[in-house]
Image: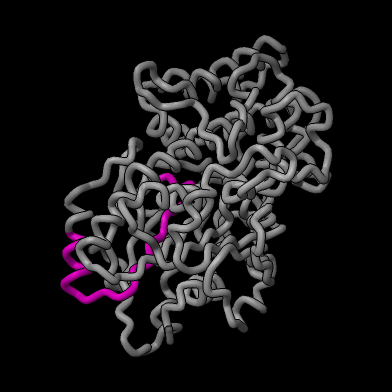
Amino acid sequence: MTGMKVRPYWELRFDADGDVDTRQRDRLTEQVEQQGITDLVVFAHGWNNDRAMATALYERFFAPFPGLLGKAAGVRLGYAGVMWPSMRFTDEAVPAFPPTAAAGAEPGLDEGTRGALETVFPGRGQMVARLAQLLAERPERASALDEFTVLVRGLARVPEGSGAALYAPDVDGDELPAMLGEEGTAYCELFATALAEAEERGPGLFGGGFGGLWDGARELLRQTTYYAMKRRAGTVGRDGLGPALGAVAAGRPGVRIHLVGHSFGGRLVSYALGGLPGDTTVASLTLLQGAFSHYAFAERLPHAADRGGALRADRGRVRGPLVSCHSRHDTALGVLYPLASRAARDDSSLLGRGDARWGAMGHGGIQAVAGCARLDLAEALEGPFPQDGCVSVDVSSVVRHGGPPAGAHSDICHEELARVVLAAGRIAGR
């Protein structure tokens, strides 16, 4: 265990290929059995730069659980935190946590973000250094922007012979985002416009003219990094967490496993369903601002009936409810995520509104799944909570704080959300 105040708590650490720290896995399996754990809540973070920040997130989120649970008869609750190599740009504020960089203080890349990029993309330090230099200097010539976009694509390139795909879609037939495969500055302009919209056309972080294009270039780098993290989350979930949970379930038959994931961690725990061995299932799954397609669980896509979500066959691995908590205040998912998704196509209305094809789970909930219950937060907490099936819970009343560019994306440490997890899992009074 670590210094976590909420106990019993364990960690499960995975590398970028989904390989688990076997000592941690074996210890978790052994302790769950020895301590008679009846319910295990497993939380996967989204973008974080280090273990300390991920641990702080878990501690804050888990803090209300003991008080809410009380002395429920027959319940012995355990907690596990997933550690996997992801990153965020350190100018993205996380509500309730001290800032790690002054947003907008430097036009380039701060030291923390540069270090995170070099860790996430090993062996590409020179690329990162040149990208940082260009963002700091902001040359007023098109050739500099062209060089920047070429370097960004090189950063995201999958090493030859690794066997990994550059892009892992959440729906059948989804295409490689054009911004990862084409030259030009069009996407810099596209993202600069979106960033201005994210600030509600007010003064602040983002400028106009050529300087504004460099704001868009920085966002191109951010979005490309996120595509790499999105791909990695699926790999760690399916090849790492799923099998590890199977080992825990085999060692303690009858233990009820409850999966929770924030942002790309939501994609991670969702893809873990497909990695569960044999007939292993989980008791519940709760997504907090899930950063992947809202059609991932759909049998058929509304705009393409011959296609469906990549995870539709895995819904049956959840015995209880599969819950998506979503907020309209999440700018990262409400503005930038669909824009990046639409940028994968030759779409003449990239900045248009009302096209639901490119929406994210954490902004509008689960879509195109028959019988999916749709609740606001008050309804979810007053109950009764659905016992199974897909459930979308609008948590905009509490997930609402955070500035651009991410908005309220990381504003998840609320007692109300802890109560949603407990209600979905029927952990108390079942």
Give me the residue at 58% from left, 63% from top: 390
Q: Quadrant of the C terminus?
A: bottom left
Corner quadrant of residue 11: bottom left
Residue 222 at x, y percent in the picture: 58, 34
Give me the residue at 53% from left, 59% from top: 287
User: Which residue is more in the foreground, 133 or 285?
Assistant: 285
Residue 68 in the figure: left or right of residue 40: right
Residue 194 in the figure: left or right of residue 126: right
Residue 250 at x, y percent in the picture: 23, 61
Q: Residue furthest front?
A: 306
Residue 356 at x, y percent in the picture: 75, 45
User: Which residue is more in the foreground, 298 or 162?
Assistant: 298
- Residue 153: in sight, yes or no? yes
Residue 244 in the figure: left or right of residue 144: left
Report the magenta residues as a range. 27-49
Corner quadrant of residue 42: bottom left
Q: Quadrant of the N terminus?
A: bottom left
Is 29 part of what is drawn in magenta?
A: yes
Give me the residue at 45% from left, 66% from top: 319
Residue 238 at x, y percent in the picture: 38, 44
- Residue 96: in sight, yes or no? no
Give me the residue at 18% from left, 56% from top: 26
Applied colour scheme: one colour
Is 238 part of what is drawn in magenta?
A: no
The answer to whether 15 is drawn above or below residue 43 in the figure is: above
The answer to whether 5 is drawn above or below residue 326 in the figure is: below
